[in-house]
Image: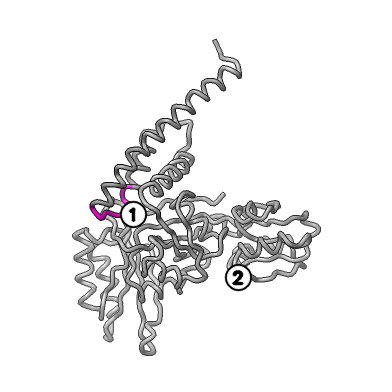
Amino acid sequence: MNKNLSELRSEIDRLDRSIVAMINERYGYVRQVGEWKHANASEIYVPEREKALLEKLEGINDGPLKNETLRAIYREIMSGAIALESPVKIAFLGPENTFSHQAALSKFGSSVSYLAKNSIAEVFEAVDRGKADYGVVPIENSTEGAVTYTLDMFNQSEVSICAEVQLAAHQNLMARCDKEHIRVIYSHPQALAQCRLYLHNNFPLVPQVEVRSTAEAAKRAAMDDHAAAVASTLAADANGLKVLDGSIEDNSRNVTRFLVIARQNPKPTGEDKTSIVFALKDKVGALMECLTAFGKEGVSMSMIESRPAKTRPGEYLFFVDFNGHRNDTHVQELIEELQKHCLYVKTLGSYPCGLSISND
C-alpha cells in the first residue's frame, strides 16, 4: 500500500537522522586521520586520494542521484573534513565572487579559509612564503587561450602544480532592472569578448564599460537602476541581482582551466598530467628534436605555449602539458631526451586529470 505524504516525510526525516549520525561518525575517523597526518608530517589535502574516492563513489552509485550531485555533496563533506584535520588557507585571484573564486570553491568547498589576492603574483607569493597552503590560478581559456602571466610566474617560482580545475564558466546578464531599461553594461574585458555576439544582437546601442573584474561589474550594477553586468551567478547572488539571461557566452563550450599550486607532489593515479617548461639550445632544429622526442616516447601533448625568455631577443621558453606522471618510466625517459636538446628542463608538477565542472 502506498504511503501518504506525512508517512513519506516521516521516512525522509528518519533517513536524515541516520545520514547526520553517519557523517559525524565519519568525521570521528577523519579527526584520527588528521592526528596521524600531523604526527607523520603528511599533507592534509591529498589530490590522488580525492580522485580515488570520487571515482569509487560514482562506481557504487546506482541512482537516481546523479554523479554530478554526488560529487557536489562529497565536495562539502571533504571540505569539512579538511577543515577538521587542520586549518587550511586557499589563496585565489580576487576579488570574491569571480570565476577564480568559484573554481577555488568547487575544488575545496566552503569550510576552508579563503584569501582573495590582487594579482596572480600575490597568489604565488602567498603559497611560496607559507601564508597560504594552496593557491588557485587561471592557466587557459578555451576561447581566449593561455594566461601568459601565470606561465611567467611558474618559471620564476618554486611551487608545484598539485591539481587542476576545469570550470565550464557560463556568463550571465544580470541587473536590478528589466532589459529595456538597461543603459550601460559593465564587465571584465575578457567576459565582454566572450559574449560579443550576444551583446551585439541584443544591446547594439548600449555602451559597454570595462572594469577590473566581473565581481566589480556586479557591484556597480547593484548600485544603478539602469545598469547591467556580465558575470557569474555567484556574483548575482552576492549582490541581489536578477539573472536576465543565462549562459550568454558565444561559445557554449567555453571552459576555463585553473591550476592548484602548493609545496607538494601528488602520487600517480593512473590518469595524470605533467607540466614542464624548457629552454632550447641555440642550434638549428632544436625545437623539432624536442617535439620528435614526445612522439618517440608515445607522449600526447594537451597544451604547448611559447613565451619570451626575457634574457636575450629571440630566446623563448616552451610550456608543455602532457599525459603521464613524473614517476612513469616513459616520462622520465622523455625528460632525459629533452635535456639533450635544451638549456634546461623544469618539471612544474604532476597531478590528477580534472573533470569539467559547471558554474551553474
Mark closer to the chain start, 2 or 1: 2
Query: Does 33 lie within the magenta span?
Result: no
Which residue in the structure is indicated by mark 1?
352
Assign the magenta stretch its main secondary structure. Answer: loop
Q: As displayed, is residue 99 above or below residue 342?
A: above
Neighbours of disc 1 within 10 Å: few (<14), some (14-19), many (20+): many
| Tag 2 and tag 1, C-beta contact below 8 Å | no
Q: As displayed, is residue 280 above or below residue 146?
A: below
Q: Secondary structure at mark 1?
A: strand
Residue 71 versus residue 113: which sits nearer the camera?
113
Q: Position of residue 293 (x, y in %)?
A: 24, 69
Q: Give the quadrant of residue 306.
A: bottom left
Instruction: Give the number of callouts.
Output: 2
| Magenta extent | 40-49
Q: As displayed, is residue 19 above or below residue 291?
A: above
Question: Which residue lies at the image location 47% right of the left edge and 70% below the top edge?
Answer: 120
Under mark 1, the amino acid is: Pro
Question: Which residue lies at the image location 63% right of the left edge and 54% below the top edge?
Answer: 238
Which residue in the structure is indicated by mark 2?
212
Query: Does 41 lie within the magenta span?
Result: yes
Q: Give the quadrant of residue 21.
A: top left
Under mark 2, the amino acid is: Arg
Q: Position of residue 281 (x, y in %)?
A: 26, 83
Residue 2 versus residue 132: which sits nearer the camera?
132
Instruction: Determine whether, in the image, residue 105 is placed left or right of residue 51.
Output: right
Observer-side mark, 2 or 1, equals 2
Quarter placement of the N terminus: top right
Q: CA distance from mark 2 to mark 1?
A: 32 Å
Q: Position of residue 161 (x, y in %)?
A: 35, 63
Q: Position of residue 334 (x, y in %)?
A: 22, 67
Question: Which residue lies at the image location 19% right of the left edge and 60% below the top edge?
Answer: 329
Residue 86 versus residue 332: which sits nearer the camera?
86
